[in-house]
Image (cartoon, rainbow, N blue to C red):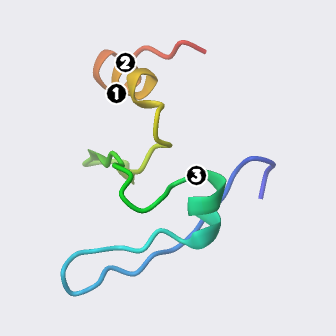
Amino acid sequence: MPKGKYIWTATVGEKGQIVIPKQARDLFDIKPGDTILLLGDDEHGIAIPKKNNFNNLFDLAFNGKDDK
């Protein structure tokens, strides 16, 4: 994998719940009780962005702008 790129799998349970792999939770500092955002696109699928990065993602998703 290229540096800074990761891939994990998760299994969807009977109630539609997924477990975020421990390595991903540790990497992105996701703790029990945290709120995460799920972004969906018919063509590209679902993305779960890193918490506290919502403003940049909203601009990119809804306005097509990337501040980088």
What residue does disc 1 label?
61
Circles 2 and 3: CB atoms closer than 8 Å: no
Of residue 19 and residue 46, the one placed in the foreground of this image is: 19
The crowd level at tag 1 (other Cα within 10 Å; few <14, some 14-19, many 20+) is some
Residue 67 place in picture, x, y as percent: 54, 12
Residue 47 in the image, given as x and y percentages of width and height:
40, 49
> In the image, what residue type sits under mark 2?
Asp
For the residues labelled 2 and 3, the Cα–Cα distance comes to 23 Å
Q: Is residue 44 left or right of residue 30?
A: left
Pointer 3 residue: 29
Which of the 4 quarters of the picture holds residue 1?
Answer: bottom right
Residue 59 image label: 2
Name the residue located 65 percent from the left edge and 67 percent from the top edge: 23
Q: Residues within 10 Å of mark 2 (few under 14, many from 20)?
A: few
Q: Say what secondary structure mark 1 lies in.
A: helix
Q: At numbered mark 2, what does the secondary structure look like: helix, strand or loop?
A: helix
Query: Compared to 8, does 39 lie above or below?
Result: above
Where does residue 31 sit, x and y in percent of width and height? Answer: 48, 58
The residue positioned 32% from the left and 15% from the top of the image is: 63
Residue sitting at the far right: 3
| Residue in the picture at 42% in, 74% down | 19
Residue 60 vs residue 6: left or right?
left
Which quadrant holds the C terminus? top right
Whether 28 is drawn above or below 17: the answer is above
At 69% from the left edge and 51% from the top edge, which residue is drawn? Answer: 5
Name which residue type carries label 1. Answer: Ala
* Disc with the residue nearer the chain's start (2 vs 3): 3
